[in-house]
Image: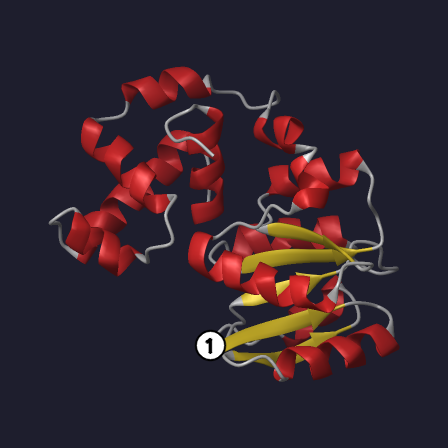
Amino acid sequence: MKKIAVVDDHEMVRESLVKIINEYPGYQVLFEANNGKDFILKLNPEDPPWLVLLDVKMKEMNGFETVHWIKEHHPQMRILILSMLDDKNTIVRMFHLGVNGYLFKSSRLQELKKAFEEIRKKEIYINEATLRYLPEILNKSEESINEYETAQSLSEREKDFLKWLCSEKPLKEIAAEMNLSPRTIDGYRDSLFQKTQTRSRSGLVLFSIRTKLVDL
């Protein structure tokens, strides 16, 4: 059962989302919050959500601030943005901060479940609405490292691991495919986090696409 936290400052929206999500097989709302600060207060580090369904515009601790906090304190937590904002700057900035997907509140209900499934399998969800911004999402010009040089300096084993990471397979299955122990795979992942200056599987996937180690 994948646990989800719903963070939105509109009570009716939260209640609707909770009802919808709890009807999805394999998913359950762990708790709801009306802003980032409320989310932090309600979060139990011993029982964290798998994914945070997060609004952007909130009066107290907005989506950007909440994403920053989550990435600093719980980088393993997935984040799916659900917002009315459909401007390029917001979408691109959110992906650069490390969110796993971005949905508009005008999306069809089935797309929410699809986003959950894609993030569960691939760690990232790019739909038709955000695909048009993919060049900007992939181009992180503000990075202080030369990603291409970093990619070229990786060992063949690390490159193979990144290619497997872009598949739907969980780490345990990737370890079996590469004939390596899960601990070794964890070591590859942690080392690549440092080398690529990323903090999540989705970040490594985007790095692999930007540096053309894998094709879309």
Residue 152 in percent (x, y) is at: 32, 18
Label 1 crowd bin: few (<14), some (14–19), many (20+), radius 10 Å: few
**Residue at the spot of label 1:** 46
Residue 74 % position (x, y): 51, 59
What amino acid is labelled 1 in the image? Glu
Please name whichever residue, 168 or 143, is drawn nearer the observer in this view of the structure. 168
Number of marks in the rendered image: 1
Figure check: 191 above or below 11:
above
Q: Give the image's coloring scheme.
A: secondary structure
Query: Would you place residue 31 above or below residue 129 in this image?
Result: below
Residue under the point 73% across and 41% down: 91
What residue is at 57 percent from the left and 44 percent from the top?
A: 98
The answer to whether residue 135 is left or right of residue 154 is: right
Picture coordinates of residue 169, whole percent (x, y): 33, 55
User: As drawn, is 148 to the left or to the right of 100?
Assistant: left
Instruction: State the residue lying farthest toward the left.
Output: 179
Left or right, 147 with respect to 104, comes to left
Give the residue at x 77% y 59%: 107
113 or 161, nearer to the observer: 113
Q: Secondary structure at mark 1?
A: loop
Q: Residue at x 61, y 20 (%)?
A: 141
- Residue 200 appears in the figure: no
Residue in front for this viewpoint, 86 or 153: 86
Q: Position of residue 166 (x, y in %)?
A: 39, 43
